[in-house]
Image (cartoon, rainbow, N blue to C red):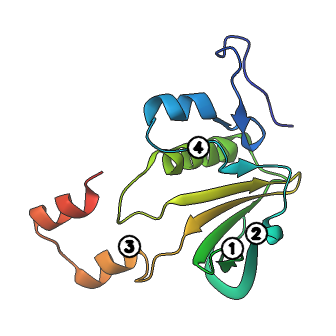
Amino acid sequence: EVTRAPADAPAGAQLLMGGLVRKEEVIARKSSIPVFGRYTNDRELEQHYTLLDRVLGTGASGDVRLAVGKADGRKYAVKSFRKSGMSQAYRLMLKNEAELYLQLDHPHIAQLSMVFETDEVLHLVMEFMEGGELYSRLSNKGRYTEEAAADAAYQ
């Protein structure tokens, strides 16, 4: 069962993802990123996106699949998490990841476009970026200069 805001949480704290992310905390830390309107638990993912068969990656909790936005025709990566059997430690990791994505605004990091949550699954709809994963690029290149590494990691 998902817990709600603790008694000492700020008044009116709205929670995302069944109690995992507090909108106010994210907004306070990064007020330039619009959070409101990017989370919903009253609409289905399939109303706004067409999930394609192409799997971009696979993890312990689900797949990352390619999708196309019905309104704009753009490509998106949809990272899906099955909520059943999710441990408390995994919930904390997911909370941290979602909060991080909500704060990021960087041209080389995929932006979180939308979050859809149902009783069974959580979908993070992210900007689709061509070119593969950073880890693969680092592995293939072998070494980067300190300047190139700092430039890639800057945020």
On the image, the x and y values in percent for residue 34 come to 54, 44
Q: Is 52 placed left or right of 138 in the picture?
A: right
- Asked if labels 1 and 3 touch by Cβ distance under 8 angstroms, the answer is no
- What residue is shown with label 4? 35
Secondary structure found at label 1: loop
Please report the residue visible at 59 percent of the width from the left and 59 percent of the height from the top.
Answer: 113
Q: Nearer the viewer, residue 129 or 31?
A: 31
The circle on residue 30 is: none
Q: Is residue 32 above or below residue 63?
A: above
Q: Are marks 2 and 1 in contact (CB under 8 Å)?
A: yes
Secondary element at tag 4: loop
Residue found at the far front of this picture: 71
Q: Amino acid at mark 3?
A: Tyr
Q: Earlier in the sequence, mark 2 or mark 1?
A: 2
At label 2, the amino acid type is His
Tell me the residue that label 3 is attached to: 135
Q: Where does the image place residue 69, in percent across and percent down from the top left?
A: 67, 75
In x, y percent, where is residue 78?
65, 70
Give the Cα separation between the discs numbered 1 and 4.
20 Å
Mark positioned earlier in the residue sequence (1 or 4): 4
Taking depth in this image into account, of 144 and 98 the one nearest to the observer is 98
Q: Which mark is residue 48?
A: 2
Mark 3 to mark 1 CA distance (whole Å) = 32 Å
Which of discs 1 and 4 lies nearer the camera? The answer is 1
